[in-house]
Image (spheres, rainbow, N blue to C red):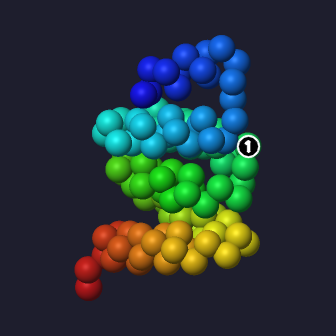
């Protein structure tokens, strides 16, 4: 699947759905770096794409970029609220809570 999507991109097709598919494909293949590149392009083309923000946060978190992951999920929550996407909003809220627990120093 990734190969055919990359071919479409190489031929000049570039849109949020293609970038989302590439990002998801690379994330599913445990390759967060190329996933981040494609998901960033996706949200640059469509800032209201809440599912892309969610996956971007996951990919960034996997690479240890916790501040960037937090920002992605916050942007994603705003995008989800704007579209009335309650499920995505809930999921990213949970991801933020878990991230905060993980990064907050123990007393």
Q: Quadrant of residue 18?
A: top right
Outermost residue, bottom direction?
Answer: 107
Q: Residue at x 49, y 21 (%)?
A: 4
Quadrant assignment for the C terminus:
bottom left
Q: Position of residue 13 (x, y in %)?
A: 69, 24
Q: Is residue 65 left or right of residue 12?
A: left
Q: Residues within 10 Å of mark 1 (few under 14, many from 20)?
A: some
* Residue located at (69% from left, 35% from top): 15
Label 1: state its secondary structure.
helix
Residue 33 appears anywhere in the view: no
In-image side of 63 versus 16 (left or right): left
Image vertical order of residue 97 relative to residue 54, above or below: below
- Mark 1 sits on what residue? 45
Numbered marks: total = 1
In the displayed orientation, state which residue is furthest to the left: 106
Depicted 36 relative to depicted 61: above or below: above
Above or below 106: residue 79: above
The N terminus lies in which quarter of the figure? top left
| x and y percentages locating residue 47 in the rendered image | 71, 54
Quarter of the image where one finds residue 48: bottom right
Instruction: Give the image location of residue 76, x and y in percent.
Output: 60, 64
Report x, y in % for residue 45: 73, 43
Q: Residue at x 66, y 41 (%)?
A: 16
Name which quarter of the figure residue 9 lies in: top right
Q: Residue at x 35, y 74 (%)?
A: 98
* Residue in the foreground of this view, choosing between 95 and 104: 95
Whether residue 75 can be seen here: yes
Locate residue 57 relative to residue 50 in the image: left or right: left
């Amino acid at each position: 699947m990734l190969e055919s999507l990359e071919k479409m991109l190489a031929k000049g097709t570039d849109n949020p759905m293609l970038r989302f598919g590439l990002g998801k494909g690379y994330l599913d293949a445990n390759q967060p770096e190329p996933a981040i590149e494609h998901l960033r392009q996706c949200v640059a083309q469509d800032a209201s794409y809440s599912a892309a923000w969610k996956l971007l946060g996951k990919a960034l978190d996997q690479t240890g970029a916790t501040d960037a992951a937090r920002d992605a999920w916050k942007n994603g929550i705003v995008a989800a609220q704007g579209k009335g996407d309650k499920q995505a909003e809930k999921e990213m809220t949970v991801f933020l809570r878990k991230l905060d627990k993980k990064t907050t120093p123990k007393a």
